[in-house]
Image: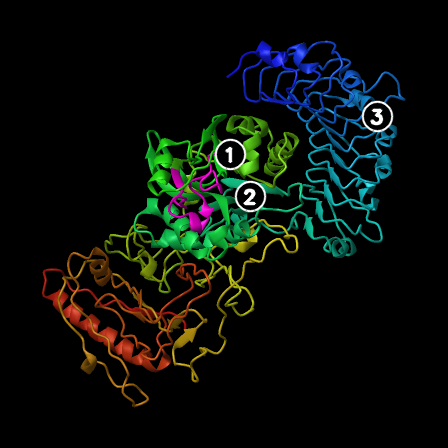
Amino acid sequence: MLCSVPDWLCDSRKLEVLELNHNCLTELPIQLLSSGSLRKLLTGWNNVCRLAERLERSQLEVLDLQHNHLTELPSNLFIKAQSLRYLNVSANKLENLPPACLSEDGFSLLEELYLTNNCLTEKCVPLLTGHSHLRVLHLAYNQLQSFTASKLARLEQLEELDLSGNRLRSVPTTILSCQRLHTLSAHSNGINAFPEVLQLPEIKCVDLSCNELTEVSLPESLPVKLQELDLTGNPRLNLDHKSLELLNNIRCFRVDPSPSAPCVSESRGAPSVWSHSYTEASGVKNKLCVAALALDSFCGIREALYGVFDGDKNVDIPYLLQCTMGDVLAEEFHRAQRQEDYMTSTFLTMQRKLGTAGQRMGGSAALCHIRHDPVALGEHCGCFTLKTANVGRCQAVLCRDGKAMQLTTVHTVKEEVEYQRVRHHNAIITEDNKVSGVTDCTRIMGYSFLCPSVSPRPHVSTVTLTPQDEFFLLGSRGLWEMLSPTEAVEAVRNVPDALAAAKKLVTLAQSYGCADSLSAVVVRLSVTEDCCCFCEPPPPPPSPGPGVHTGTHPYQTSDGGIPLPPPSSGTVSELSSELSMSEMSSEVGSTASSEEPPPQTEPMATHLHLPGRIGVRRPAGGGGFHRQFSGALSDNGLDSEDEEPIAGVFSNGSRVEVEADVHCLKSREHPLPQTNFQTNQTNIPPSSTGHQEPTQASYSPVPPSSPCLSAESRSGTLGRRGRANGSVACQARSQDVIEEAGDAPVRKQGGYFNAPAQPDPDDQLIIPPELEEEVRQIIQQQQQEQMQAHNQQTHPYQKPADYFVTPL
């Protein structure tokens, strides 16, 4: 790194462009600024504290001094540098600006001025009026309390104005003089009156989020070129039906949901351990090539999923990842044999399912999955773990006790391991450190034609969340090119609102020079030491009968309910009283291809809890991949290949369920000895209809090594097990005889991407009416045999327990 500018640079007579970014310079020689040949000087991210008080004549056209420690600029900067068209002094400590010229009739060619993140007040506003050719003005995150109306009227050539993060109460009405204005950003202020900006003919984007708006005054017709209007973060804003109907015609209109709609976590009675918000911004070409995924409730209230996807210059890949990666992760999480492998499997599976879209295009991705996983941490107990995976340049950062903690990494050929791997596959590395001249990342989604030199295998990290964790950030490539992890954490640590924090990150990146699409996700954490007591699922429903289990059981019971195995037991998904976090056991898929569109029916509830997803309307033509629901409910029990409904079998289009009844017996005070016996079809009385039953059920001896089954047989608890065709069969020997549907329809696929079927909490075994009396007789006969065997022991005689039948 350079600590000073060499003398030979200052004496160069033909030097036109000089870049000195990311060094340790403390001063810039006056000879360099007054060079007769230098046209472009970039000295950002240094330690420059002051410049020369006065300059000689300068030929500079572009001057970048951002991220230094400047408190003032040369007093005659704009007078001597009359060719200056671009000036960026963001992220300094400026309190004032030099005048544009000596008199009001002076002439200035300055077109772009970036003053974000300084200490400027409204006193600097009159000094801006001398720049009559100014097109872009960024004054975000200063200390402006007002903007003089008469001064704004003189900036007639203004096209982009950013006044975010100040203390403004209103936007001057003289903004109507800026007839060329197409972008107005004034979020994170105290604006209470909607500006008359919608009357401008060229206006395209308006951001008035995080203000104090109460109403919106709209013209009779909206501007033709208006594409985006953001009104989120205005809690007192009231929009009537007429205004909403008019605003919905905007291609991208954002507004807060109704305050009467409860939050997902609050509606379930759980404390808010995390909350999020995110924002997206298109690039200079008005093309949004990023996407964000934010699910506060993913597969239940104890899990969350957040992600950021960046397609660089393509739109298809990020939208495809946004729509489908959540479903793929849920499926891989339940399928993975080892918990630490599911993130890697998600990325590899997603790579295969990109199909033709991922052959010539690629994109970066970062996923953060929060799940309930109690682990011991010394004196404390960690309730939640944060697992992060990324490929490409999308990254995530955790703020722990005020310090930035990197959760992801970027793999390039600059790493020795990656370089050797790429060279092993005989790939070409160009002089700009890109693989085959395409991408500088060796691990990224897509680009199948570069495989195996470019791999989708992600970097995975796992941390246990503690009370010292304040929040974590996810950002796209452009965000981290402008902001370091430490700078990003310090910028938003004191911003309590997650939406305002995400907006600030994007605004800072744009003012620092990012011209690409941007996306930022901010997730606030409220992890406490006693969070485990709030994270437990609700108690199971009580047993249909009034009896109370008095016998010992290896699993916990509650109010006489069916004993539940621990979460690590393999029978969790087999019990009808499983405490599932999903609302329905329906299979929901997300399609990314239009080859086989699913039937458009009413949407079913999904394990992803779609009401919790925060999304915006995508620009038309921005991407052809939308979330769809696969599968349809069948009202008559008929499948597409069946002509007659099967008795006792109900199909919802993707799975088959057999209707049966659960007979819950009172547990005995003393456990019964295990006896091996079998029941065949000869023990089953003929049905009342007089025809032979199509199937038979047999009971096999239960091995003593199975604690689950032996415990169920001792206590009389009934279990179930799902078979491939959707029917259910008994597990223990003291259970009912259930008719199995032999002609059950074959289980069909649920869409392009199949989410794993979740156990239905309302699902129960119901015996068809024609078999009810027979099953009761068999149960009574089994009870008598068990009691006779029990009486042979030394225990005193005990009256058989009554049975209780659940209502059909």
In magenta stretch: residue 451: yes
Foreground: disc 3 or disc 2 = 2
The amino acid sitting under disc 1 is Phe
What is the crowding at mark 2: few (fewer than 14 residues within 10 Å), some, or many (at least 20)? many
Read off the magenta span.
432-461
Q: Nearer the viewer, mark 3 or mark 1?
A: 3
Picture coordinates of residue 428, whole percent (x, y): 42, 40
Q: Earlier in the sequence, mark 2 or mark 1?
A: 2
Q: Is residue 115 magenta?
A: no
Residue 313: x, y in percent? Answer: 57, 45
Give the secondary structure at mark 1. Answer: strand
Residue at 45% x, 71% y: name it: 652
Mark 3 or 2, nearer chain start: 3
Look at the image and tell me whether residue 71 can be seen: no
Spatial distance from mark 2 to mark 1, Cα to Cα?
Answer: 26 Å
Within 10 Å of disc 3 (Cα), the crowding (few <14, some 14-19, many 20+) is many
529 vs 541, nearest the viewer? 529
Quickly name the residue at label 1.
471
| Along the line of sight, the residue nearer the viewer: 633 or 152 | 152
